[in-house]
DNA sequence: CCAAAAGTGTTACAAGTACACCCATGA
DNA sequence: TCATGGGTGTACTTGTAACACTTTTGG
């Protein structure tokens, strides 16, 4: 370890997910320069020597979205030799889950900026670098995490209804779940705290809940169906 | 992306697991130089610019153990600013699972070398750098993977008995499983192919099996108990 | 009284758990 | 014939799946 070796560059890429109108969206930026000029890409940037990987990811998130807080998890490190035509660049990928309110703010802030946009994961453009592969991997991880942990609640406001949860799950898995079984299952986990009924709705007012546990805990959520 | 930024060093560390005498072991090396001189550490080294992360891990594995093939999986990338006193070093950790035969060869090759040794994960020495944290994380991942995938079979020879599998699981989870239920569960997965009875044993000859699926596939193995 | 979404229970089936004895072989 | 490890079945409990109607509110 005493010798000096040539060093690779290290970037952090961050895949920002949100659910809007029951559709899973991902935030992409349009590249202004070569390589892959005018292609869409996952936002990211070089790490600084004085910041941890996680802080680099947080900084990126803040720079791209203005958001200070979101569920953030390291995804995987991609380091193939030729993944970047400019030279050896290793990227540590993170993914972030925004709650509905935060996501709305961004869409407002950025709809007039041409180089940042939300894309439905069902209709993605061609992506720069190996970003399609990275995104694909992120989607796999996302589903896995939704199935076995409480990360899904990070995409909801602090107080939410059972229907909110179910719609979020139906969006992520792109399938419908039986209402009675879904509710039974979620309630049986004992992770929700009732918070009283929602007011001023023009139908039967739903019960609101908050999450008792820390977001991300392993619980085994889904019915198999 | 056009500017040149100061670059961190990037290493690959590889946590090598094997099961010996129904005990989970990890391969550690004794550091010959500062920092952490004479401390035990997870083997690793700097990546080369012309090799992928995975190839760097394979090369490390080969250098440390002489083994060409093992189940190998990226674990996590550790990049805290002060994890290495010599400067900014990011490490991409991998873990490897050796089968019983390979593991035996290594122990033979290295028992007379003082700076490489197998340690029971139950009795670990103090480790250099943040290696205790890394190893703890590896153990967590290992259990998770055993619970939900077929990685466990990578620690067995190509042909094995149901008792072999059960003992491996009992070692990893450090608990006993009911023989009948364990067998029923494993067989019900439909992932095993019978390979005939073992010969020359001084008791009732057990049925041998091989794995039909690719190692690492998700199947959900364990009884909950 | 209508529209909209919330809320609820039962039966059938599958999977998981607990548990103890006989079997085949070589020495 | 004995020692050793291999192999097996059943009753019970728990969890999952399928399925349709009533309730509450605001307009």
Image: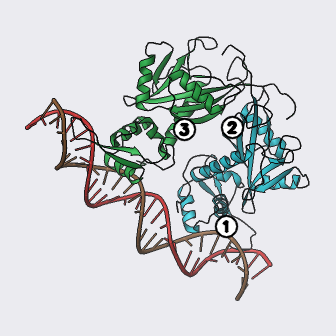
Chain colours: A green, B cyan, C red, D brown
The chain letter for the residue carrying disc 3 is: A
Q: Is residue A124 visible?
A: yes
Q: Give yes or no for contact between labels 3 and 1 (Cβ–Cβ under 8 Å).
A: no
Residue C22 at x, y = what percent? 58, 80
The residue under the point 77% across, 51% down is B126
Cα–Cα span, label 2 and label 1: 44 Å
The residue under label 2 is B78
**Secondary element at image label 1:** loop
The residue under the point 74% across, 54% down is B18
Label drawn at residue B92: none
User: Image quarter for residue A41?
Assistant: top right
Name the front one of labels 2 and 1. Answer: 2
Q: Which sits earlier in the primary sequence, circle 2 or circle 1? A: 2
Viewer-closest of D26 and C24: D26
Residue A33 at x, y = what percent? 61, 11
The residue under label 1 is B206
């Amino acid at each position: 370890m005493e010798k000096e070796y040539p060093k690779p560059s290290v970037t952090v890429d961050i895949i920002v997910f949100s659910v809007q109108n029951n559709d899973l969206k991902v935030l992409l930026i349009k590249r202004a320069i070569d390589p892959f000029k005018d292609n869409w890409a996952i936002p990211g940037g070089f790490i600084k020597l004085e910041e941890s990987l996680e802080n680099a990811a947080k900084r990126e998130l803040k720079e791209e979205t203005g958001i200070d807080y979101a569920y953030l998890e390291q995804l995987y490190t991609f380091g193939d030799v030729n993944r970047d035509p400019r030279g050896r660049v290793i990227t540590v990928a993170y993914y972030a889950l925004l709650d509905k309110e935060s996501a709305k703010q961004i869409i407002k802030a950025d709809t007039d900026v041409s180089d940042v946009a939300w894309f439905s994961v069902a209709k993605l453009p061609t992506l720069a670098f190996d970003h399609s592969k990275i995104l694909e991997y992120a989607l796999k991880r996302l589903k896995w995490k939704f199935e076995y942990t409480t990360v899904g609640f990070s995409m909801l406001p602090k107080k939410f209804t059972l229907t909110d949860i179910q719609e979020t799950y139906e969006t992520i898995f792109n399938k419908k779940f039986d209402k009675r079984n879904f509710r039974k299952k979620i309630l049986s986990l004992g992770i929700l705290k009732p918070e009283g009924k929602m007011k001023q709705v023009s139908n039967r007012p739903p019960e609101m809940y908050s999450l008792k546990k820390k977001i991300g805990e392993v619980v085994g959520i889904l019915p198999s169906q």
